[in-house]
Amino acid sequence: MGHKVHPTAFRLGGIRTWSSRWFADKKFADFLHRDIKIHRFIESRLKDAGVAKIEIARSGGKATVTIFTAKPGVVIGRSGANIEKLRVDLRGASDENIDLKVQEVRKPDMVARLVAESVARQVERRISYRRAAKMAIQRSREAGALGAKIIVSGRLNGAEISRTETFLDGKIPLHTLRADIDFYHEKAQTSYGAIGVKVWIFRGLVYGDQIADLPLE
């Protein structure tokens, strides 16, 4: 049996960096639980905002939370009303001084999380999983991905026995450390059980001291 390694964790310290950036001595557990609470709070409030990533940085007694989203208008709201309310509610929930920032993701089809969520929501609406996966891979390739792979598993189409189907186009060099591989796993909750959706997107090779990041341009 092969050992499965998360593509992002495999590249930490190399071409990838941590989503939470802070130093703590005795408060490590406290900060860790606060980060988890912040992530869950934002994800529950912005389910339909296309949130691709949440970064948290702490310094000088203040936490800076950056939300990367494909729909910045939904997060910010008219005249900044939504983000201001989110900031106030987040400060109350986490009990610390929080500064919110929003970054737009220009190419959502190059982000594994957004692609996986899109496929999962389509499966929940009883759209054919084959059509959803193939269309998602095609859009990712057209957006500039060098390779894309989607694995769908579970009781597909309500079958009695669960099975796994793989859809692949291009190349996914998982063993190449300088390869910018984006990965995400999402669940589709259907009437006949949970359907797992795994997405890998190969965005190119990273050389030197570059850091692989979301496609913001």
Image (cartoon, rainbow, N blue to C red):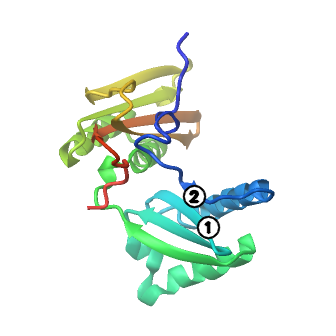
Quadrant location of residue 149? top left
Viewed as shown, does residue 23 lie left or right of 131? right
Residue occupying the point 46% across, 37% down: 11
Viewed as shown, does residue 25 lie left or right of 44? right
Determine if residue 49 is in view.
Answer: no
Residue occupying the point 58% across, 39% down: 191
Numbered circle sitting on residue 22:
none
Quadrant location of residue 104? bottom left
Point out the tag, 1 or 2, that comes first from the N-terminus. 2
Quadrant location of residue 207? top left
Query: Is the C-beta separation of discs 1 and 2 under 8 Å?
Result: yes
From the viewer's perspective, is residue 125 above or below residue 56?
A: above
Question: Element at badge 2?
Answer: strand
Residue occupying the point 78% across, 53% down: 29
Viewed as shown, does residue 99 lie left or right of 133? right
Numbered circle sitting on residue 21:
2
Q: How far apart are marks 1 and 2 (CA)?
A: 7 Å
Label 1 amino acid?
A: Arg
| Front-most of residues 61 and 74 | 61
Q: Position of residue 194 (x, y in %)?
A: 58, 35
Residue occupying the point 57% across, 58% down: 21
Q: Where is residue 81 in the image (x, y as percent from the top left)?
A: 50, 86
Q: In which quarter of the image is the C terminus?
A: bottom left
Label 2 amino acid?
A: Arg
Q: Quadrant of the N terminus?
A: top right
Numbered circle sitting on residue 58:
1
Question: Element at badge 1?
Answer: strand
Q: Where is residue 41 in the image (x, y as percent from the top left)?
A: 64, 64
